[in-house]
Image (cartoon, rainbow, N blue to C red):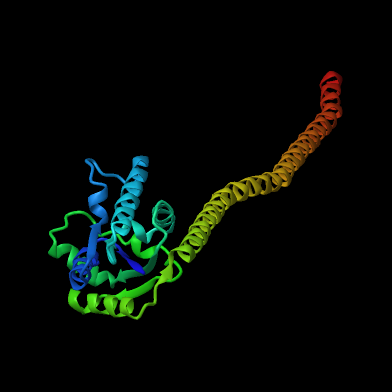
Amino acid sequence: MKKLIIISGGPCVGKSTVGKRVFEHYSNSAYCDGDWCWCVNPESIRDNRQQYGDRNMAFLLSTYLEAGYDYVVFSSVVMTEPETRERVIRCISSQDYELHSFRLVCSEDTLKGRFDAKGGRAAVSFFWAETPSVPGEQIIDTDNKTPEQVAREIWRAVDKGEGIPASVVMKETKKAAKKTVTNATAKKTAAKKTEAKPAATVKKETVKKAAQKKPAAAAKKTAATEKKTAAAVKKTAAKKTTEKKTTEKKPAAKKTAAKKTAK
């Protein structure tokens, strides 16, 4: 049975170099690099037209498989993403093949070193390293290994016949893609809830503060009233004292006046 060998992984992990080694190892083989299928300027992962690149990949792989090549080697970064992988495999017209899938990984330090060696100017992206693996995918750590050593691991696995029939591949990739979408939706929902929580908390705290302010305002008003009442009482008492003194002075004044008259 014909074998489709997919080698995925993040940028600078060694996919193309290893893919060519595997391709050169087998006779009656064909090789495709995913970068050949979609080369545009400017390039952006947000460009919805990238889906046409998936079609190009599927068409080229279908052509190689239907042309009768025993080994079709395909290296691509986007095949790391379950949804893209599902779209590409779904569009492959040939169903008479066995899939052997490998993902190359390495440590962050190794990736930075390889990126710098290629003269990379942009920041190193670890996005692809965080995407989930798919069923049947073999993970190969490329740290401290030459491309030849990694390629040898791949062709040994392929020669053992540990591939997955195309019919099974379709079912498994659909499940993986669906799971990824579900997880992404759940993550998005959780993020929305997290964003909503502070607003609810703020509202709750505002109501609480308002409730706390009411007694304080009432107490302040009561204190002001009491102060005002005390001032009024004090004023009244002072007035009475003044009136009393005035009343006491009047008889004394009359008495003095009477004495003066008598003289």
Q: Position of residue 43 (x, y in %)?
A: 26, 44
| The N terminus lies in quadrant | bottom left
Residue 72 visible to an observer of this rendering: yes
The image shows residue 163, relative to residue 57, as above or below, that is below
Report the residue at 80% width, 34% height from top: 236
Q: Position of residue 211 (x, y in %)?
A: 71, 46
Number of numbered labels in the structure image: 0
Q: Position of residue 19 (x, y in %)?
A: 23, 66
| The C terminus lies in quadrant | top right
Find the residue positioned furthest to the front.
Answer: 68
User: Relative to 81, is 154 on the left or the right?
Assistant: left
The image shows residue 245, relative to residue 175, as above or below, that is above
Q: Position of residue 15 (x, y in %)?
A: 24, 65
In the picture, residue 23 is in which quadrant?
bottom left
In the picture, residue 129 is in which quadrant?
bottom left
Report the residue at 85% width, 24% height from top: 254
Towards the viewer: 127 or 165: 165
User: Relative to 172, is 61 on the left or the right?
Assistant: left
